[in-house]
Amino acid sequence: MSAGNYGKSFAYASKHYGSKGKVVMPETAPVSRSILIQSFGVEVERVPTSCLMNVVNRCVQEENMTFLHSYDDLDLIAGHASLGMEVLEVMPEPDVVVVCCGGGGLLAGVAAAIKRSGCDKTRIYGVEPEGACTMYKSFIEKKPVGMDTKSIASGLAPPFAGTLPFELCQRYVEGIVLINDEEIKAAVSTLYRSGLVVEPSGSAAFAAIVNNKIPELEGKNAVCILSGGNIGKDELANFSD
């Protein structure tokens, strides 16, 4: 189940190991991503976001497939944690780290790696779109929740927050901040003009920083994670000024 990035890596691994695979994608994801995933020989089924898990469950029950979760999985979170270790190699004691948040796998892994490496004073923030704020709502309700998500950042709009990511984020993340789609669009455009091709989902952390959503940044060592360049020319054209 993926809006693109996880599906791409899943498809690459499926081809590498010669296994049969299928990616269930939300209809809102760019078609170019589906085509790329299919080029690795993996089947793609595009459905409304609210139906994603129904289709996954059907594949498991009727086609005897194994579900590899795109964010609520301990091995996957541990893999994402390696990015936290990379951050510490460059900046051993960051004051603030800002990470985008969809289902929460990346945020949970990075936060756990940094905090468990002894950086107790580092403040880690997750960033979500206003129209897809499952982790933000989960923090308020103190349990993982789902919602009918809608955002230009399709990679940050899964139908629900992950249980494992939620537990780790509660422990290691300072807070979740929200940005809107216009702020995401502007961030993609600004980064592109600076020579960086970053997809909407990957530019969320940068959007939060430039729109002053992260408290007490003045004079601090801050790390902003840009987490994906999975964007085609057709999509990029919609973001140019």
Image (spheres, rainbow, N blue to C red):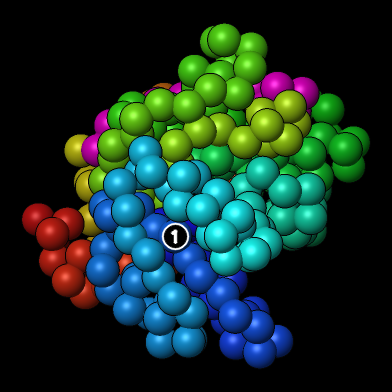
Q: Where residue 141 sits: x, y (%)?
A: 57, 10
Q: Where residue 220 sits: x, y (%)?
A: 61, 32
Instruction: Tell me: residue 78, above or below residue 192.
Output: above
- Of the pair 58 and 96, the residue shown nearer to us: 58
Is 170 a magenta residue? yes
What quarter of the picture does the C terminus occupy?
bottom left
- Of the pair 77 and 31, the residue shown nearer to us: 31
Quadrant of residue 27 in the image?
bottom left
Instruction: Tell me: residue 136, above or below residue 221.
Output: above
Provide the residue designation for mark 1.
24
- Of the pair 176 and 37, the residue shown nearer to us: 37
Residue under the image location 38 percent in, 43 percent down: 51
Is 61 a magenta residue? no
Report the magenta residues as a range.
169-181
Residue under the image location 77 percent in, 23 percent down: 171
- Residue flagged by tag 1: what amino acid is it? Val
Most extreme residue toward the left is: 241
